[in-house]
Image (cartoon, rainbow, N blue to C red):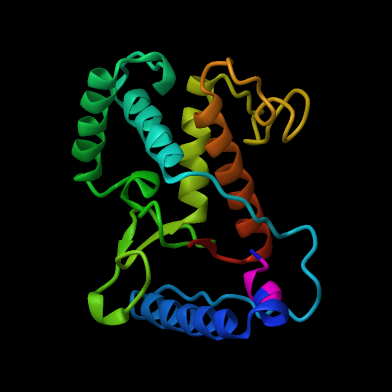
Amino acid sequence: MGLLYDLARNDAEGFDHHRRAFARLGQALMAKGISWHEPEITDPPCAHTFFGGFPYSYLTQLDRILVLTNRGEPVTPAAAVSRLQYDRDCKKIDDEMSMLSSHLLCHSNTAGYYVPVDFHDPLFLPDEAEVEGGGMVGSSHRLLAELSDIAPSLGINLDDEGALSGSGEAGPVVGLAADRPFETERFAWSLLYRACLASIAGGHAIVFH
């Protein structure tokens, strides 16, 4: 969030690219009956912005947690299982993804968008729309709900309003010791959680790039 503001001041070519991409996204969503456009930022972004990143493999590990949780199977850290077991679990990800219902699982790990509109199933836009990420668009609201559902599996406490409880937003999630269980999964969870909150509050898309 705040991407256009930053690019407008530091990368004119990148700004033009993403502004056109947001325009294509808005038009494609309108064709699906969804009204949304990326806000043009003219003032410095403040509270409703967020930037962050992590290796693509972290998302796969988080996908695995969602699948194990949904199936009611024992949830273990990726770092604590054998490669054979991890590969077996990843095949379960493919099975769950084929249901086309999870906003986390169906989204590309490398490109695409989540928009702050609450729609039930992920959207799959046609190729001619030229929307990055293979045309799959997720809902920031639904992604936040899925993250909330798996929080207990990662030992993350949320209050009744879905906010982090205890020592605050970053305290129980970020800055874990390297030998703590679910370190990578919790790190990815935290960044996506904060991105969802910023997206919903500010009306901006979450952009994977």
In the rendered image, the vertical position of residue 151 relative to residue 8, given as above or below: above
Residue 116 occupies quadrant:
bottom right
Span highlighted in magenta in the image: 2-6
In-front residue for pair 44/33: 44
x and y, in percent, of residue 182 in the image:
51, 22
Q: Is residue 52 left or right of residue 115?
A: right
Q: Is residue 63 left or right of residue 208?
A: left
In-front residue for pair 114/3: 3
Q: Residue at x 60, y 51 (%)?
A: 195
Residue 70 occupies quadrant:
top left
Residue 135 visible in the shown view: yes
Q: Residue at x 55, y 86 (%)?
A: 16
In-front residue for pair 121/154: 154
Q: Residue at x 35, y 30 (%)?
A: 64
Residue 3, magenta (yes or no): yes
x and y, in percent, of residue 82 in the image:
30, 15
Q: Considering the image in quadrants, where does the N terminus appear?
A: bottom right
x and y, in percent, of residue 83 in the image:
28, 21
In the rendered image, the vertical position of residue 118 relative to residue 7, given as above or below: above
| Magenta stretch, overall SS | helix
Q: Is residue 95 left or right of residue 75?
A: left
In the rendered image, the vertical position of residue 189 relative to residue 203, given as above or below: above
Q: Residue at x 35, y 15 (%)?
A: 81
In the rendered image, the vertical position of residue 76 relative to residue 202, given as above or below: above
x and y, in percent, of residue 34 in the image:
43, 73
Residue 85 occupies quadrant:
top left
Residue 77 visible in the shown view: no
